[in-house]
Amino acid sequence: MKYLLVPIFAFLLIFSSCKKRHKNIRKVISTRKGKVAGSYNSKTDVYSFKGIPYAKPPVDSLRWRPPQPVNKWNDTLRAKKFGPICMQPKPRPISMWSREFMPPAGNISEGCLNLNIWTKKGPANAHRAVIVYIPGGGFISGSGSVPIYNGANMAQKGIVFVTINYRLGIFGFLAYPGLTNQSPHHTSGNYGLLDQIAALKWVQKNIAAFGGDPNNVTVAGQSAGSYSVNYLVASPLAKGLFQKAIAESGGTAMSPSNSISKAHTLSSAEKQGERAAKMLNANNISELRNVSADSLLKIEQKIGSFSPIVDGYVLPKSVHDLLKNGNYNNVPVLTGWNTHDGLIFPVKSPPAYRQSLKKRFGKYADDILQQFPATNDSIARKSQIHLNTILFAEIQSWEWMKLQNQTGGDKVYLYNFQKDVPHTANEKDYGAFHSGEILYAYDNFHESNRPFTSTDRKLKKTMSTYWANFARKGNPNGNGVPYWPPSNKQNNFQTMIFGDTVGHEQIPSLKDLQLLNKIFTKQMKKTQ
């Protein structure tokens, strides 16, 4: 009898082990800091976990300090509603951005360092690809709870989708001598980027419990989120935290395209911080930390933008220099722009436009006018939208691709979104506007009431398939979608065109890019 018990006992051990290995994702998941209870949608088979803190609330003495690890909690955290959004002006629809581009109405707070996760029902050890999405908003607004970032449909494609909040504006990017003196790294500012890095570290430690693979993470974002991705690719502090990058409409790979002056440095940012302190009648950092959040927000609106800087720590040098010298996190990149990204900038009259070119390009202004003319109001408007699109996004993607081809080993896939996004009868036609591609790339038409057509739905299916493929393997290609070649000089900078049809061709506006690149290269040499 005892001999019979041995194989039975061995069988029970194996059965128990198999059960453990194949444990399914459930509504309650244990993270390193405590249990979280999410929601389950039986129609989609997707779990969602919202408002999970990844760092302590950066308030009181933690204001303008690097994010600190969150304390453990004993009771199960209800993660069924979005957490607070970071300090910003009250979100409201404006211009081309209707309600689906806005965070939901709710709590706006400094205690906002939380994230959201969508994951499909299945084995907890599924090792699914992960996308960590950084919201846009010009570094002064936005939230991971914006409807167009809903991760449910990407989760259905087998992606564990994460959205995050990070400190914005003066709360996330104030540099100040008193802060620099307190820092062991002798720097200040870039707290918002440090938040993003902290969120990525949280993902590394916890995402496996949600079915994700910490060794297969894609960091993604659009606009300010795309700039953030560019910064994270360049930052030594983000090394090993992700294996791929998606950057939509934004970046700073070509330094002078956003400012002819030298890069925004710690010194210049500290002067901006001192100006803010003076306006607030604060004489030191302790007094600044006692200023109300609302008062800080009002000062920010008077002074202007607070944004990432070359601080010598998070960003040792400009992104351009780091890419050029090969000192960056070399990963496969998917990046591009929208044809009408430039609409986010004001359109000037022909005389004002010509004057702005002289101020920005100096003796090269006439060369710019030849390719971006202003012979009448209509032509000047078209030229400005086109030029601003190139300066803001297109040349950034192009330069990033060229530098990575020179100094890295991983491929870069370029795209140009040309599809006019449908609009309702009460809205203007903004064409392929800034952030319009998000609805397609992340399969979120259900969050919008725009009159999408069968052509739109086909494009959405194609783009979201590319994005999911890229997250899984660093290559957008796969069954059922047209071939997307990596871009390089040898193939004439092939770019995927997303419009009424999908296909690749030489990068649009190549002559314009070459002219601007020539001018910027000369200007960079003068400032060095």
Image: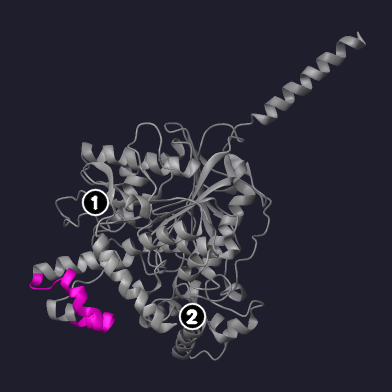
- What amino acid type should be assigned to the residue bearing mark 2? Thr
Q: Nearer the viewer, residue 409 or 83?
A: 409
Count every numbered label the image shows and give the total: 2
Q: Residue at x 32, y 50 (%)?
A: 494
Judged from this view, the residue extending furthest toward the top is: 1
Judged from this view, the residue extending furthest toward the left is: 376
Quarter in which the C terminus is drawn: bottom left
Is 291 left or right of 491, judged from the image as shown? right
Describe the element under mark 1 as helix, strand or loop.
loop
Residue 385 visible here: yes
Q: Nearer the viewer, residue 283 or 262?
A: 262
Q: Main secondary structure of the magenta part?
A: helix
Asked whether 89 falls inside the magenta stretch, the response is: no
- The residue that disc 1 covers is 418
Q: Nearer the viewer, residue 144 or 92?
A: 144
* Distance (Cα) linking label 2 and label 1: 35 Å
What residue range appears in magenta? 355-377
Is 6 left or right of 398, judged from the image as shown? right
Residue 259 visible here: no
Describe the element under mark 2 as helix, strand or loop.
loop
- What amino acid type should be assigned to the residue bearing mark 1? Gln
Judged from this view, the residue extending furthest toward the front is: 490
Of callouts 2 and 1, which one flags the residue occurring earlier in the amino acid sequence?
A: 2
- The residue that disc 2 covers is 265
Q: Residue at x 35, y 38 (%)?
A: 483
Q: Residue at x 32, y 61 (%)?
A: 394
Asked whether 376 falls inside the magenta stretch, the response is: yes
The spot of residue 27 in percent (x, y) is 56, 38
Q: Is residue 359 above or below residue 496?
A: below
Quarter in which the N terminus is drawn: top right
Which image quarter: residue 516? bottom left
The spot of residue 476 in percent (x, y) is 41, 42
